[in-house]
Image (cartoon, rainbow, N blue to C red):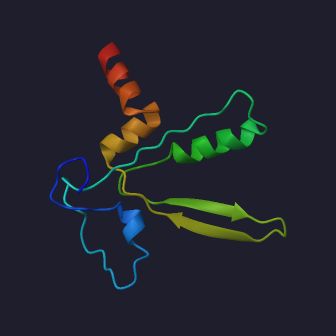
Amino acid sequence: MHSNSTPYDAAELIELLPVPGLAHITPLPPEVQKTSVFSAGIGASAAHPEIAQTLNNFLARLTPGQPLTCIVKHRDGTRDNLRLDHSFNESQVEWFKAGSALNLIKQVGER
């Protein structure tokens, strides 16, 4: 059992999807759902800060319930369009865009 004291032993959905025979038909109950929130930044010594900024700009377009499309441009001139689904809700998108939940709390407190 996990330290969150729920009676379930659960994994993140991303860990469950590749399991053969498992069908995902509904979100996990909130008491067992794990949320991983990520933020992005550019290191002061980044070798290619312009590429990192392009990625940050791309991720800044996160919208609840809307997939992102990533266009991969290959050296041979071909392209692949990748649909990137996410499960961020409105609060999680706000956290991400603020850099973290703590940054968002600070911003709200400064208003």
Whether residue 89 sits left or right of residue 51 in the image: it is left
Q: Quadrant of residue 49?
A: top right
- Residue pictured at 37% horizontal, 27% vertical: 102
Q: Position of residue 95 (x, y in %)?
A: 39, 36
Q: Position of residue 71 (x, y in %)?
A: 65, 62
Task: Give the farthest residue toward the bottom.
Answer: 21
> Which of the pair 82/25 is nearer the observer?
25
Q: How many marks?
A: 0
Task: Give the farthest residue toward the right.
Answer: 76
Can the viewer see residue 71 in this picture?
A: yes
Whether residue 71 sits left or right of residue 96 in the image: it is right
Task: Give the farthest residue toward the left.
Answer: 7
Q: Position of residue 103 (x, y in %)?
A: 41, 25
Q: Quadrant of residue 107?
A: top left
Q: Is residue 72 above or below residue 19?
A: above
> Which of the pair 80/44 is nearer the observer?
44
> Which of the pair 80/103 is nearer the observer?
103
Q: Position of residue 64 (x, y in %)?
A: 36, 51
> Which of the pair 34/38 is nearer the observer?
34
Whether residue 53 sits left or right of residue 102 in the image: it is right
Q: Is residue 70 above or below residue 51?
A: below
- Residue pictured at 51% horizontal, 42% vertical: 60
Q: Quadrant of the C terminus?
A: top left
Whether residue 96 sits left or right of residue 12 in the image: it is right
Q: Is residue 93 above or below residue 86?
A: above
Can the viewer see residue 111 in this picture?
A: no
- Residue pictured at 41% horizontal, 44% vertical: 37
- Residue pictured at 39% horizontal, 43% vertical: 93
Q: Quadrant of the N terminus?
A: bottom left
